[in-house]
Image: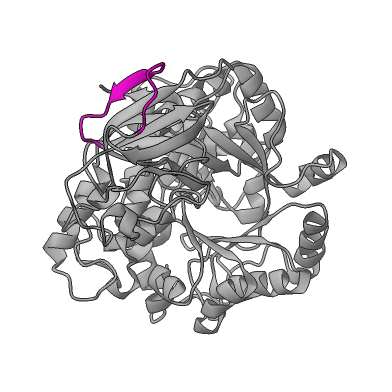
Amino acid sequence: MTPAEPLLLTNARLVGGCVPNVGIVGGSGGVAPTSPTFGGAAGGSVGGTVDVLVRDGVVAAVGAAGRVGDGGVERVDLGGRTLMPGLWDAHVHLTQWALVRRRLDLSGARSAAEAAALVRDRLAAGPPEPGTALVAYGFRDGLWPDVPTADLLDAVAGEVPVVLVSGDLHCAWLSTAGLRFVGVGAHPTGVLREAEWLPLAAAVDRAPDHLADAWVADAAAAAAARGVVGVVDLEITDNLTAWRRRFAGGFGALRVRAGVWTPWLDDVLAEGLRSSDVLPGTGGLLEQGPFKVVTDGSLNTRTAYCHDAYPGLTGPEAHGILSVPPAELVPLMARAHAGGLRCAIHAIGDHANTLALDAFAATGAVGSVEHAQLLDPADLARFAELGVVASVQPEHAMDDRDIADRHWSGRTGRAFAFGALDDAGAVLTLGSDAPVAPLDPWFAVAAAVSRSRDGRAPWHPEQRIGLRTALEASTDGRGLVPTAGAPADLVVLDADPLAPGADAGSGSGDADAADLDAAATALRDLPVAATLLSGRWTHRTF
């Protein structure tokens, strides 16, 4: 990968209008925006600008405009635009996201019959290539008035294989021909959930490497256009092999931490790779990521493992499904931890979260609980006590609020409890779980600070977090101010997300709903002018 040429970014503003007024900001620790060096309290505007010198892929210096001199480098006038560290998505399935961007979208279907009609219309426009299936994505049947069945799809698809993947990836609805396509014989409903479906997902995600890699590159470029500089990729595959191939082929749009699942754990440990190890030949952009384990299901499928039974369900799965019980989870985590890997443990139901935290306590492992959607109040403080990160996806709260009101009735005050986690001292990181939600950190930030979308009243507004907190949870620990010595992973914005009034009361319970919705919409649409990765432009509009 060709080294980036030095740049001097001039006439930049820092978020909130904060400006250094003495010398050059130096040192890897940087200067906090509330420091007197930045002209007083964070969020105040004093009208000045800064210059930022980028050299050898890192921020070499930050100082007041005109005080960072280097006549031998290219100067780029940012024209008073806002400059901050680039954004990360802490939980993606990037190959699946790249595929979903090309699939039939079922997210708007409000019934099984409506989803089948969308399939019928797509097939009428053109069937899939022989030997392939029509694959669609995004249905959520938790509130549907009717029942999805293979017969319903057979009526519109005949012998064309049809595979409809749910919005949370935890189940699929298949026609009879679709069942045969993935190797399943007779099935009573055609709806495969959790362990029935997850091992088969790869069968419909197959694409030639050259196509999959091209589609991933397109998806990464789209992410860079939203200010993204890095992702934690938790694709269910031999992830490291795929990413080594992509970087060898010239990929360079994002930093990637490639997670590993149990089937490939032995390979990673045998290679001696530890989390955060940089893989050679990737320009420093590919790192070994965490060890991922899914311990329960999801809300939409009523398989998230909960202390209380789901309304109307009886039998052994009335409380959800515990996919990996403690007797399996603890030894797996201990082994990964001994090999230097962080652990990323999927837990959605409150009982699953309790057990995940118990496993962190038993093993001393470090890492994150992924999702943490429903929490026992007694577990809130344990995140900080154990040093476990709450890796959350705020847009899921907007997608699932109505389903939660039905299936977690009486408990939603502790669902997607970002405010309570923040108050308890937990470290939050934000992500999308793309393709479950779009790979766009501004969506996550907007949902976290407003708890509203589409003009609806905020849902449990007491669980909002402040805008500054949400932004800091999206920059991979780099804060909100470029600092000397840090990687030159930067985003240039055409609007200041921390301009006065932008917070619209986030973190309090009394903000006007209309103001919150307007502020959230502005965040979702926030214009990104440019993105720098290791000092190279990956997106630029000026």
In which quarter of the view is residue 108 placed? top left
For residue 149, side relative to residue 17 (left or right): right
The residue at the point 64 percent across, 72 percent down is 386
Q: Which residues are magenta?
A: 68-81
Relative image position of residue 158 (x, y in whole percent): 48, 31
The residue at the point 38 percent across, 47 percent down is 481
378 relative to 163, above or below = below
Towards the viewer: 404 or 18 = 18
Towards the viewer: 43 or 293 = 43
407 relative to 336, above or below = below
Residue furthest right as drawn: 270
Tell me the quadrant of the picture where the N terminus can be found: top right
The residue at the point 24 percent across, 56 percent down is 453
Relative image position of residue 198 (x, y in whole percent): 63, 47
126 relative to 357, above or below = above
Tell me the quadrant of the picture where the C terminus can be found: top left
Residue 326 visible in the snapshot: yes
Q: How many marks?
A: 0
For residue 335, side relative to residue 223 (left or right): right
Residue 175 visible in the snapshot: no
Relative image position of residue 266 (x, y in whole percent): 84, 44
Residue furthest bottom as drawn: 378
Towards the viewer: 109 or 298 = 298
